Amino acid sequence: MACDLVGFASFVTLICNFILYLADGHMAAKFTKGPRVTIQQVASEAGVDRSTVSRVYNQPDLLRSETVAKVKSVARNLGYSPNSAARALRTGRNENIALIVPDLTNPFMPPIALAVQKAAAKLGYCVFIGNADEDPSHEEDLLLRFSDQVAGAILASPRSDQSTIKDLARNTPLVLINRDVAGVPRVLIDAGQGMAKAVLHLSSIGHRKIAYVSGPSQSWANEQRRGAVEQAAKEHGVKLEVANAGMASFSAGVAIVDDLIALGASACIAFDDVLAQGICYGLAKRDIEIPQDYSVIGCDDITGLPMLSTVSSPSATAGRRAVEMLINSLKSDLEPDTRIVLETDLVLRDTVAVPKIE
């Protein structure tokens, strides 16, 4: 139940922000009955040329911001919206992009989705969002379904294998978030940096045996994070155990607690904050106090209770940079093997303390 509430709250946040975004007038003009308002009517009312109105919606960077604001204000008042279908026929280019995520209810995804949406809107693009439900075959199916309607796509934390992603990239312009595939533009959040710092901190305050709680086996981020923890544990002389939760969910975190207790570690680092929150809940149900009896560190810096010590995650920046890369790719202004890496850090809050000495 708690897992459902976490996911539902994230989804509601996304939808509310989307509604507010629409209400603010950034995505579309108001709908009116009757004949469609023409570009010439907008130009006449705004006192500009037809070409200026066209540039407002296609190349606003060539115009003064005051001109863009004035024309858009007139267009909204008249009920004008650009005819994207006609423009696509004329130019051969759709002004839509797709964002495909493995699990929209995971709190890590809504900040990416919102950032993608806002960045795309500023560049004149709409965003179609597809939820793959942690199934690689759904990723491919969604992309194929979107292919005739979008100019390109962003795959966030894709679960498909590397060869499939390369095949998809040959047919549709792609940018990846949190997946390192050579030859495909990608934005990577290097959580390994923060994970290594987490191990160092636990070691420095006296933890000698810790556990890493693994997430989805198909996740590139999970492989990266686990590898960083293993390497750091060797460097600092910390004994490391691994517990496989399988899924990055609250319920999986709760279910793994008995295994964690059996390992005899004094602290754990979880694949992400959702898992960590489930672990905290499961420990509390067994009357194990956090952090006095057991320390917990998550990843992705998702706000909630308890106030988790975690590894930061510039997810919104990743979404924004991915849009910029995709649009540049569509303009042939981007090298196919472009790779951007975003740094992370350890954020200490309320779930880490010096271990008890028995």
Image: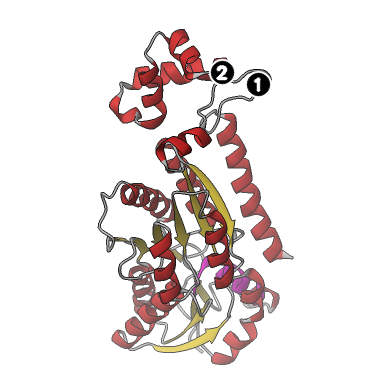
For label 1, the SS is loop
Residue at 27% over, 64% down: 337
Residue 74, percent from left and from top: 49, 15
Q: Residue 37 carries which label?
A: 2
Q: Is residue 277 rendered magenta in the image?
A: yes
Q: Residue 209 carries which label?
A: none
Residue 80, percent from left and from top: 54, 21
Residue at 36% over, 20% down: 51
Of 222 and 25, the residue lying toward us: 25
Residue at 40% over, 63% down: 169
- Residue type, label 2: Val
Q: Residue 32 carries which label?
A: 1
Q: Is residue 107 rendered magenta in the image?
A: no
Q: Can residue 347 be seen in this view?
A: no
Q: Nearer the viewer, mark 2 or mark 1?
A: 2
Q: Which of marks 2 and 1 is nearer the N terminus?
A: 1
Of 143 and 9, the residue lying toward us: 143
